[in-house]
């Protein structure tokens, strides 16, 4: 492998003993061997997948479809919300109640380099958050909308427990969001329906009260009856008058004449009375009553219609709210890894070796180039 | 071993060689500036005025015709960070491919090596693109058209990473082009076709999830993402893999240096 020392220039050692090679290749590889071979703790990865379902079946526009395919889309807004919640300080704070999260990562069994807060100097919540972000991943596949939650921890049970807890937190958040949206959607319709109901009741009772006090049921319908009565009386009056004229011509002394006169007088009074009731100036006339009655009945009518519309829109809102509710559906439950999959020790060492060999090659050739210059 | 003895230095030839190389590259740089831009009209200012004009034009065009991906990212800053990076990684290989012909006679001097010619041109390109990016950013900031970068250090880191990748790419193309005209002919279509893919005109986050990993196979996309991550902060939602860029850069660099050591001997001083 090595050329015999006699072939080399006097000052040169074997190439694998020169400082450049030691610094570029041997040192990094040794560090990698020590870290990957001895120090690094086993990392267990627990994975779960979920989908945030929302039943919003709005048909996308052509532009929306285009944007969906081309860019900008990271699933539904709900799943984006779930993702952003999972990677938030809020989620960590909920997870870290009684330092539960921090305790999973500062166990004495974990390698000093991998542990959270190894020196006791970086124990703030912000430091924990930074650490959290390097151990929890959420990836959303924009086409299928499935989010993948990956948790790295130093024992299998921790990884699964944290994953499970995070999933539950996401569920709670999405449910709360959905419930709030549902309530908001219904609230205004419900309020309007309540108002309309009160108004309809008030208008109805105002009309009933007026009927009682004014003694009218419906002037529009009562007036024809009134006029019929008058015309009947008129007929009777004409008959009575012609009877009296005939009698006066045939038997002027008949004692029936005063009786007929009395009858005619009676009919005339009734006619005056009835037609005054229908349209006269008196306060009790039907025409006068009609004005007030018309106002109240219009109001009642309007209130009924408003109530109908409000109830219909409340029903629509309720339907829509039902459709828009979103929830977290678990596609894959968090798994309990039975083997540490990271770090990939051999691969890490090998990568370091190959990379440092290439760097060494570049450095050697550059330095050889420098040596070609002589003053 | 002809230099003065330096008893304190472990390896005197290396330090001396470095000093000489620095002077050589410095001299080549000055020569390059003079031969390229001359002393007439604005002279060497063209170094960054030229890329500035390019970027200004594209920025103006995009600002008028395109919509930004999101409200958080203004189109002017998007175009500025995008097109500046294109100038950086595209001009470096272009310069290197045609580096040897005009400088062939210089190789007569023992201390002028091919790598020195490449490096001087690369330094010049990098400097020009950086000054142009800087001046335009300051200009737009003063005009109130863009906000200052959120994390300047990260922008610089991304810019230098892209510069290193550009260097590796340029050396690869440049050494491949030695005694091989096809490379120069091919580079133009390749650089034009890569432009729309290069991340200047889009952010990885806006691509469908299935395409994102493919886009990140292009190292310049990763670098542009780093720069935009620094520039826009958390609005950008960046995706990048520094390890990948580093690996590609180093491997290409090694390939270029090996090619150079093999092909370098073929370059005749004539």
Image (cartoon, coloured by chain):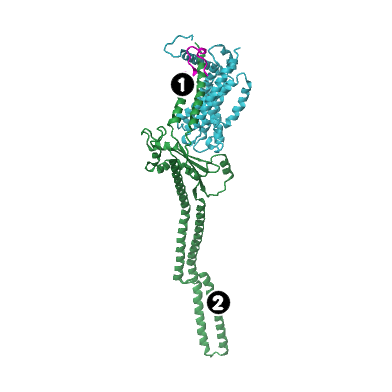
Say which chain is green: A
Looking at the rendered structure, which numbered label has been put on residue A330? none
Find residue B118 and report its horizontal and vertical position in percent.
Answer: 55, 19
The answer to which image quadrant residue B216 occupies is: top right
Find residue A219 and report its horizontal and vertical position in percent.
Answer: 51, 70
Q: Is residue A16 magenta?
A: yes
Name the residue furthest left.
Answer: A120
Give the Cα separation between the discs numbered 2 and 1. 130 Å
Instruction: Answer whether residue B43 is visible to the viewer in this image.
Output: no
The correct choice, above or below, for A194 with respect to B66 in the image is below
Q: Secondary structure at mark 1?
A: helix
Q: Are marks 2 and 1 on the same chain?
A: yes
- Of the chain colours in the picture, the one used for chain B is cyan
Residues packed near mark 2 inside 10 Å, few (<14), some (14 to 19) or many (20 plus): some
The correct choice, above or below, for B155 with respect to A162 in the image is above
Which residue is identified by label 2? A231
Find residue B210 and report its horizontal and vertical position in percent.
Answer: 56, 38
Q: Secondary structure at mark 2?
A: helix
Disc 1 is attached to a residue of which chain? A
Q: Is residue B207 magenta?
A: no
Looking at the rendered structure, which numbered label has been put on residue A22? 1
Residue contact between numbered discs 2 and 1, judged by CB atoms under 8 Å? no
């Amino acid at each position: 492998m090595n050329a015999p020392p006699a072939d080399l220039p006097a000052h040169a050692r074997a190439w694998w003993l020169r400082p450049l090679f030691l610094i570029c290749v041997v040192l990094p590889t040794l560090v990698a061997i020590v870290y990957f071979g001895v120090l690094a703790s086993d990392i267990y990865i627990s994975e779960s997948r979920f989908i945030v379902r929302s039943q919003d079946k709005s048909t996308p526009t052509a532009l929306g479809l285009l944007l969906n395919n081309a860019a900008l889309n990271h699933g539904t807004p709900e799943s984006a919300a779930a993702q952003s919640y999972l990677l938030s300080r809020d989620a960590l704070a909920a997870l870290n109640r009684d330092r539960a999260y921090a305790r999973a990562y500062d166990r004495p069994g974990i390698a000093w380099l991998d542990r959270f807060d190894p020196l006791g100097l970086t124990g703030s919540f912000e430091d924990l958050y930074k650490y959290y972000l390097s151990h929890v991943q959420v990836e959303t596949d924009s086409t299928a909308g499935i989010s993948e939650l990956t948790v790295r921890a130093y024992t299998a049970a921790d990884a699964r427990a944290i994953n499970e807890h995070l999933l539950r937190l996401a569920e709670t958040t999405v449910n709360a969001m959905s419930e709030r949206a549902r309530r908001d959607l219904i609230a205004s319709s419900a309020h309007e329906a309540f108002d309309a109901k009160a108004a309809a009741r008030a208008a109805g009772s105002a009309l009933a009260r007026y009927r009682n006090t004014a003694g009218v049921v419906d002037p529009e319908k009562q007036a024809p009856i009134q006029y019929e009565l008058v015309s009947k009386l008129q007929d009777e009056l004409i008959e009575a008058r012609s009877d009296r004229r005939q009698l006066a011509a045939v038997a002027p002394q008949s004692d029936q004449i005063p009786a007929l006169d009395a009858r005619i007088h009676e009919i005339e009074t009734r006619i005056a009375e009835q037609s005054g009731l229908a349209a006269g100036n008196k306060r009790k006339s039907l025409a006068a009553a009609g004005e007030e009655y018309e106002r109240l009945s219009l109001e009642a009518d309007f209130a009924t219609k408003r109530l109908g519309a409000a109830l219909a829109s409340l029903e629509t809102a309720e339907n829509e709210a039902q459709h828009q509710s979103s929830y977290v559906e678990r596609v894959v439950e968090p798994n309990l890894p039975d083997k540490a999959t990271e770090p990939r020790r051999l691969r890490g060492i090998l990568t370091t070796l190959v990379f440092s060999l290439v760097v060494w090659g570049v450095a050697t050739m550059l330095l050889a180039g420098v040596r070609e210059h002589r003053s | 071993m002809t230099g003065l003895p330096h008893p304190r230095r472990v390896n005197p030839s290396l330090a001396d060689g470095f000093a000489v190389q620095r002077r050589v590259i410095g001299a080549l740089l000055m020569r390059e500036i003079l031969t390229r831009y001359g002393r007439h009209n604005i002279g060497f200012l063209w170094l960054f005025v030229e890329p500035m004009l390019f970027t200004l034009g594209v920025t103006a065009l995009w600002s008028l015709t395109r919509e930004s991906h999101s409200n958080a990212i203004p189109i002017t800053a998007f175009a500025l960070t995008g097109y500046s990076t294109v100038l950086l990684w595209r001009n470096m290989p272009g310069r290197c491919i045609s580096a040897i012909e005009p400088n062939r006679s210089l190789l007569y001097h023992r201390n002028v090596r091919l790598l020195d010619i490449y490096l001087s041109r690369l330094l010049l390109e990098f400097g020009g693109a950086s000054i142009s990016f800087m001046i335009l950013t300051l200009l737009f900031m003063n005009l109130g058209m863009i906000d200052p970068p959120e994390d300047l250090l990260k922008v610089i880191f991304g810019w230098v990473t892209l510069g290193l990748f550009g260097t590796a790419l340029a050396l690869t193309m440049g050494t491949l082009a030695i005694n091989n005209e096809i490379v120069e002919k091919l580079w133009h279509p390749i650089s034009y076709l890569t432009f729309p893919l290069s991340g200047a005109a889009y952010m990885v986050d806006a691509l469908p999830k299935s395409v994102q990993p493919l886009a990140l196979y292009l190292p310049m996309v990763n670098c542009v993402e780093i720069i935009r991550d620094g520039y826009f902060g958390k609005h950008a939602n960046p995706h990048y893999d520094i390890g990948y860029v580093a690996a590609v850069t180093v491997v290409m660099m090694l390939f270029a240096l090996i090619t150079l050591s093999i092909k370098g001997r073929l370059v005749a001083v004539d």
